[in-house]
Amino acid sequence: MKASTSSGSTAAPAHNAPLPPTSSSAGRSSRIAPHSHIKGLGLTPEGFASSDAGGFIGQTNAREACGVVVDLIKSRKFSGRALLLVGAPGTGKTALALAISQELGAKVPFCPMVGSEVYSAEVKKTEVLAEAFRRAIGLRIKETKEVYEGEVTELTPTEAENPLSGYGKTVSHVVVGLKTVRGTKQLRLDPTVYEAILKEKITVGDVIYIERNTGAVKRVGRSDAYAASYDLEAETYVPLPKGDVHKRKELVQDVTLGDLDAANARPQGGQDIMSVMGSLVKSGRTEVTDKLRREVNKVVKGYVDQGVAEVVPGVVFIDEVHMLDIECFTYLNALLESQMAPTVILATNRGMSVVRGTDDIVSPHGIPVDLLDRCMIVKTDAYTREQIGKVVQMRANVEGLKLSPEVLDKLSAEGEKSSLRYALQLLTPASIMASLAGRTQIEAEDVNEMNELFLDAKTSAAMITESHAPHAQAEGASS
């Protein structure tokens, strides 16, 4: 998946989604995710961590270490190794992984998963891991196609009687007028092209191109002739295309090996890899054979050798990696050694623990020593009370909430006593209580009411321990 950043005072798009939100998906872009405030590692050009930058507060050592890893990945010198993030819950391990993906760029695939995802009744554990690795390896394909490109000057669908019904009508063809600097052209196109135009929400004045062979439609942007100083829409304006309407154009498409595997498992259209690009389909949770993957790799290698395609290694992030078992860890070793391997980032909050799938193998972080030996380990530190206050204030700004000074102090104390996550989780319900009371600002009484309604993990554990103690004493006396 692909991470994107945005600047300004507006809420940033969700970063834990497999694909970046677009301007047309207003519902997704308005969603506030747990790590919406993360914009990057916040490092200076020299590689030193700023105290408050990129959405991060503190964690200077961990961020600087991750900055070195980013440089290694960019220089293609991190293959065969993995990055392991260790630390207590709520200390920013997932945020660091997302920041690394931000630093690598929006076009680099980022595939996050949780260790427990491998346990599926539909596919094998190793198959889930292999699929995640394939989705994290991008392929940038350059090909020259015949296209019709220009600014839309006319968009007229022509209706005809529906042969299957005497009452309804259907679109028989669509007339599209395109204009470039050199001239104009009127095209009479198939109804399927009209459906694609409607799907892309194309209107008169948009600059588009239509592939001559496949009929695929791509919206480039709005013609700059419609740009005005009073236009407040977040629109991309592009100049009027040069040359003729009908031309040969070099197109760049970004896909992943996982997309190619799925498309070839249920092929549509031609057999070569270029035909697959226009017919990618979402496959169900069915297994892709190793034979098919080898065939896809062979074709990809051929195009890379010809200079038509470029492999873009992405990032696989496996959170709660201690949930994997010994079989998965063994398979991870093999995947790390393969020629086409993405960057692997692991995260765990465990200390010495039994490796899952075994009875007697105790290892640091619940990871076998042979895999641990391949990892560069970065430790995250616990937050101080002052840092917790800054994080709470930052999240409040992202969510558009107003906090009184007393609330900030109280939530900082709560975060230090229990956890940062608990302090952040109190923000939204406290804002609801404030709005019910007719206030726009969260006050200390709202947080106090939240503490009466909800328990943090440490308080809950202490209450359970206290309730179990009398029972244990009674059982001991009776025995």
Image (cartoon, rainbow, N blue to C red):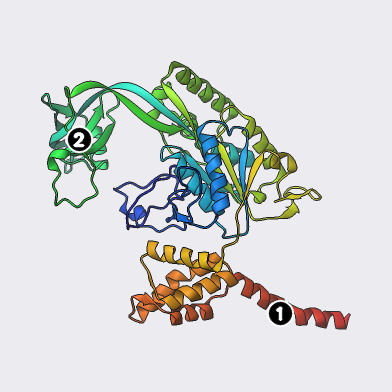
Q: Dot 2, how many residues are within 10 Å of its Cα: few (below 14), some (14-19), or many (20+)?
A: many
- Secondary structure state at the residue bearing disc 1: helix
Separation (CA) of disc 2 from disc 1: 69 Å
Measuring from the top left, give residue 394's x and y in whole percent.
43, 63
The residue where tag 1 is placed is 466
Relative image position of residue 152 (x, y in whole percent): 15, 35
Crowd band around label 1 with a 10 angstrom C-alpha radius: few (<14), some (14–19), many (20+): few
Using the image, determine if residue 389 lies above or below residue 363: below
- Which residue is at 43% across, 40% downward? 105
Q: Nearer the viewer, residue 161 or 327?
A: 327
- In depth, the one of 107 and 70 nearer the eye is 70
Name the side, left or right, on which 203 lies relative to 371.
Answer: left
Seen at 52% across and 40% down, the residue is 70
Q: Position of residue 246 (x, y in %)?
A: 19, 22
Amino acid identity at mark 2: Val
- Type of residue at label 1? Glu
**Residue furthest top as drawn:** 306
Closest to the observer: 458 or 40?
A: 40
Residue 68: percent from the left, percent from the top?
55, 41
In this rendering, the count of numbered labels is 2
| Whether residue 269 is visible | no
Regarding residue 82, the answer to whether it shows in the image is: yes
> According to the image, label 2 marks what residue?
207
Where's the C terminus, which quadrant?
bottom right
